[in-house]
Image (cartoon, rainbow, N blue to C red):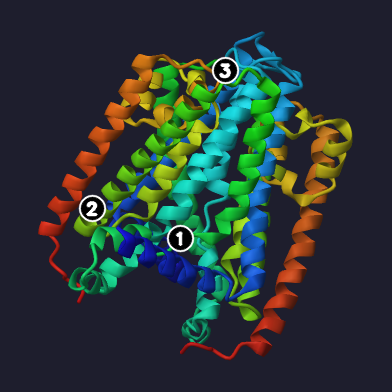
Amino acid sequence: MKKYWRVVKNQWDEIFTYRLNFIMWRVRNVLQLLGGYFLWLAILTQDGQVLGYSSSVLLSYIFGVYILQSFIFATRTQTIGVEITQGDLVNYLIRPVNYFSFYVARDLGDKFMNFFFSIGEFLLFYILLQPPLFLQNDIRYLILFLLSIILASILYFLFSVLLSFIGFWSQDIWAPRFIFSIVIGFFAGGFFPLDMLPKYLFAIFQAMPFQYLLYFPMKIYLGQLSFGDIGLGFLLCVFWIGVFSFITKIIWERGLRVYSAYGR
Amino acid sequence: MKRYFILWWLFGIKSAKIAFQSRFGAGLLILGKILRFSLFLFFILLIASNTKTIVGYSLWQVVLFFATFNVVDILAQIFLREVYHFRKYVVSGDFDYFLAKPLSPLFRSLMGGSDILDLPMLALAGLLLFIAASQIGNITLINSLIYILLIVNSLVIALSFHIFVLAICVMTTEIDNMLWAYRDLTQLGKMPIDIFREPLRGFLTFVLPVGITMTYPAKALMGLLSFSSMSIAFGISTVFLLVSVWSWQYALRRYSSASS
């Protein structure tokens, strides 16, 4: 456990080594928040409602998604693909560490760093602009919300690791990830709440696992789901985690069979 | 000038060959770009289905802003893609070779590799622009000419930003997120800059001129831009270009070739 804690601390040191780069990373996040906030505000100011959402609920959704993305989507697992294609994976296979635990530790370091700064940026934003926000005060919803964030982080970790495993068979590791990054934001509810979509489209989105990354946790936070729906959502999310864990295990084993440490 | 055009062409062919080394990867990247474009267009349509106007602009006017954003953004990507590779040249010491050759190192660093994969996107953005302009109607020849001039002006501002980023890279070797911050900044221009409230709107128009770069050309096409605003736009781009070239020269004087 101690060695993985060291990995978390190393991750923080690595981030702060390139300070200008880190500052620009935070600037990027603030710009994205600014863009989303003012766009929705412009749409909302006309009659205070849009597609069934009031100002405070919709803006809470936008801010909530901003903070959730900083935690759930923060990952270093994209480098797994680089390590496979450049042959560096062997360095890890011969070390007395579990490769996946190592990456879980790196991800945790990245997630908490991102989360910490996102909260700071959000508070600054809130003090300056004072947007109307919905604050959930039902402890049951808050606990379920936290649980859904943990499940979403596991699901996203599996997606990202699976994408990196493409490196076992192809040098084209960035193009699939590029498409994934575009699709995931939209299908997870990063652009807008998915129930704004026409019913038939919403039904299709609900059948996919992506909604559990952002939309489902935010709906729990907003208290817009019954406890029955939340329970069913958790069951389905755990089901998807099981499915993708199984696929990840199979592909990892098959990948290692064809891996030749090419590039070393 | 002719020599530089030939070199740019040769660099472009080299980049195209690299991009199509893996046709599967190139195909996926083009597909991703089309997806990104389509999803945002879908988002605009979804919003427009509920509200008739956004900050006073009709659906087709908003689409025109989006199409113009894409035209400027894609043209900048096509011509200035090499900037994304600049850090590795500085870190590895390969930038020394740029300096030793009888060719402007600035030209080599900016235009040493065009992104051919953006060409289909340019066609798509052009088509959307044409459809939106047709739907809006009342577009005059004079306004179209001013539009083209302002697009060129926007590219000068984009060029200045990229030169500035190169200068910072020479001095700090840290530009990856700075380039992406620039991209995120320009993304604010997907919609008319009028969605932002003062003083942020003024800041994003004149200090970090996203408004001039992305919103002004579309406004001019619709005949909504005053002569004084156009003059300010050309003035700001000139200042940006001069300052960026000066910063590049300043950075070069401090280049220590530490990695070579």
- Classify mark 2: helix, strand or loop: helix
Picture coordinates of residue A100 (x, y %)?
58, 71
Which residue occupies the foreground of this view, B217 or A139? B217
Seen in the picture, residue A97 relative to B39 is either above or below; the reply is below
Image point 72% across, 44% down: which residue? A187
- The image quarter containing residue B8 is bottom left
The nearer-to-camera label among 3 and 2 is 2
In screen coordinates, is B252 left or right of A93? left
Q: Give the labeled residue for mark 1.
A: B114
- Classify mark 1: helix, strand or loop: loop
Q: Give the labeled residue for mark 3.
A: A42
Q: Residue furthest right?
A: A200
User: Would you call the spot at circle 1 few (<14 residues within 10 Å), some (14-19), or many (20 or more)?
Assistant: many
In screen coordinates, is A9 left or right of A73? left
Image point 56% across, 24% down: which residue? A39
User: Would you call the spot at circle 3 few (<14 residues within 10 Å), some (14-19), or many (20 or more)?
Assistant: some
* Label drawn at residue A14: none
Picture coordinates of residue A229 (x, y %)?
84, 36
* Label drawn at residue B167: 2
Image point 53% across, 57% down: which residue? A75
